[in-house]
Amino acid sequence: MGSTVELENNIMGEFKHLVIVKFKENVLMEEILKDMEKMVAEIDDIKSFEWGQDLESLEMLRQGFTHAFLMTFKNKEDYSVFLGHPKHQEFSATFSTVIEKIVLLDFPATLVKPPPKAPAEEPSAAQNDQK
């Protein structure tokens, strides 16, 4: 496990932008996703981007929401830059025309369980022979 300082930096550093969407009927999802991925690729302030489609929840619980999009930023300042970025502004204008309902949550991330560290590589036989 990392040091207290490393954990504090992780806890207080990242900022998340979560978008949960119910699209209007007959929306061409492939085009929307392609445009979103293009926007994300062109904005360096976005640290990571994930999206998914709900295939498991009961409709009663889902309430028509089908897609979730999660962007991670290094900090809140990078998120603020993203909000004003011309590519985001352009995409948002188009994106808003295909949405029936939307939920947005913007929050500083709190790391509760860090991902496992990758196991250290063992030296190869050739490296051992050189010693």
Image (cartoon, rainbow, N blue to C red):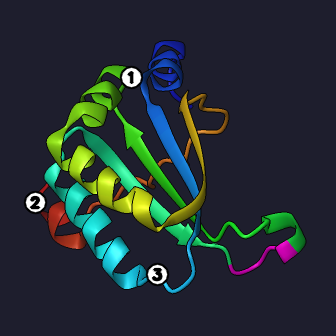
Label 1 sits on residue: 76
Q: Earlier in the sequence, mark 2 or mark 3?
A: 3
Q: Is residue 61 left or right of residue 78?
A: right
Rendering coords of residue 55 (x, y %): 69, 81
Rendering coords of residue 43 (x, y %): 18, 46
For disc 1, the neighbor class at 10 Å (few under 14, some 14 to 19, many from 20) is some
Mark 3 is on which residue type?
Answer: Val
Q: How many marks?
A: 3
Rendering coords of residue 85 (x, y %): 19, 37
Residue extent of the magenta highlight: 55-59
> Label for residue 130?
2
Q: Quadrant of the N terminus?
A: top right
Q: Nearer the viewer, residue 112 or 102?
A: 102
Q: Are marks 2 and 3 in contact (CB under 8 Å)?
A: no
The residue sitting at 18% across, 49% down in the picture is 87
The residue sitting at 10% across, 60% down in the picture is 130
Q: Which marked residue is nearer to the observer: mark 3 or mark 1? A: 3
Label 3 sits on residue: 27
Q: Is residue 75 visible?
A: yes
Mark 1 is on which residue type?
Answer: Lys
CA gap, disc 3 and disc 1: 32 Å
Q: Quadrant of residue 113?
A: top right
Q: Magenta stretch mostly in which secondary structure?
A: loop
